[in-house]
Image (cartoon, rainbow, N blue to C red):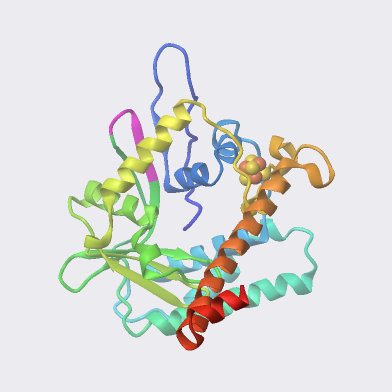
Amino acid sequence: MTSTAVPDVAGPVGDAGGRPPLRLSFSRVDSYRSCPLRFRFAYVDRLPTVPSPHLSWGSSIHTALEAWWDCKLPEPPPVEVLLDTLYARWDDEGFAGMPRDEKIRWYRHAQDVLRRHHARHAAAYVPAVATEQWFEFDVGDDVTVVGSIDHVARTGNGGFGIVDWKTNRRAKTRQQVAGSLQLAIYTLAAAHLWGREPDWVALDFVVPGVRVTVDRADIDTDHALAEIHAVAALVRAEAFDPAPSALCGWCDWRAVCPAFEGDGPDVAGTAVVELQRLRRRQERDRQRIAELERVVRDRLGVEAVLEVG
Ligand code: SF4
């Protein structure tokens, strides 16, 4: 699951009388990378989060998948295991106050996603070695990495693979999956838990119904460790500046964020987000202009390009 539930927070930062150990999960490192101030609000200040339909929906899907993959049956468990678990353990928290029709749409969407997951995986079903497998291991420098692995899958050769279920609307590319910090952390965790690394790791994008699998050899655990230590050093240095981005729209603490102080068009955070959007557009335009110039040059010659200019 994307949002790894971790029992305790990053630990007090900058305690007098010695450096406290720091506990980092993928979610925490990812949170820091997206916005250091959001990390502080969540894990140092421990400000309360706001329940959301997306989080509750994703949590309900994960619970159903866990129940299905955890069935220790020789035959593929029926789709009812998924659907009954969804019904029995539906997380309603994020839907409080939502009109009933809208909530039913979310529920039906979850049913569809689970039915499709069953159709994709039932034929080759093998019970999981473990689901929601908790881990924690030291990586040196008083840093402990914690988290849980959604699905440890048995492979034909006596090894195992690691799957993380994603409820994003779109799948990522193979290159993006190979570069996943989360999967690199799980690879390290597997070596710690079982004394061997997985044969492969995968992100299963359950909404579009796509599993993207990469070999262990494609995962860069050294880079992941370097990233974890870099974030740990910044957390210890209390480097918690805001980093406004398009994600601010989903931030629970925008109302108390200094980047969004004030009103109107002069709010710094709004200006940064707008600037980022315009720069991305400018870059897309620049690339398209270069493509079009190449076409005109190849067909009509350099002079024609200059004339257009
Ligand atoms: S509103 Fe944006 S900049 Fe401020 S804490 Fe949240 S994510 Fe960071």
The location of residue 91, given as percent across then percent down, is 62, 60
Question: Which residue is nearer to you in this view: 87 or 41?
Answer: 41
The location of residue 266, given as percent across then percent down, is 79, 42
- Residue sitting at x 26%, y 62%: 218
Does 251 appear above or below 307?
above
Image check: 190 left or right of 177?
left
- Residue sitting at x 32%, y 75%: 73
Magenta range = 140-146
Residue 144 magenta:
yes
- Residue sitting at x 72%, y 70%: 103
The location of residue 8, given as percent across then percent down, is 48, 36
In which quadrant of the rendered view does residue 60 lie?
bottom right
User: How many marks can you see?
Assistant: 0
Question: Which residue is nearer to you in this view: 47 or 274?
Answer: 274
Does 159 appear above or below 188?
below
Image check: 246 left or right of 204?
right
Does 22 appear above or below 290?
above
Does 124 appear above or below 215?
below
Extreme residue toward the front, this view: 303
Quarter containing the C terminus: bottom right
Extreme residue toward the left, this view: 157
Residue 217 magenta:
no
Residue 163 visible in image: no
Image quarter for ligand 1: top right
Question: Which residue is nearer to you in this view: 81 or 204?
Answer: 204
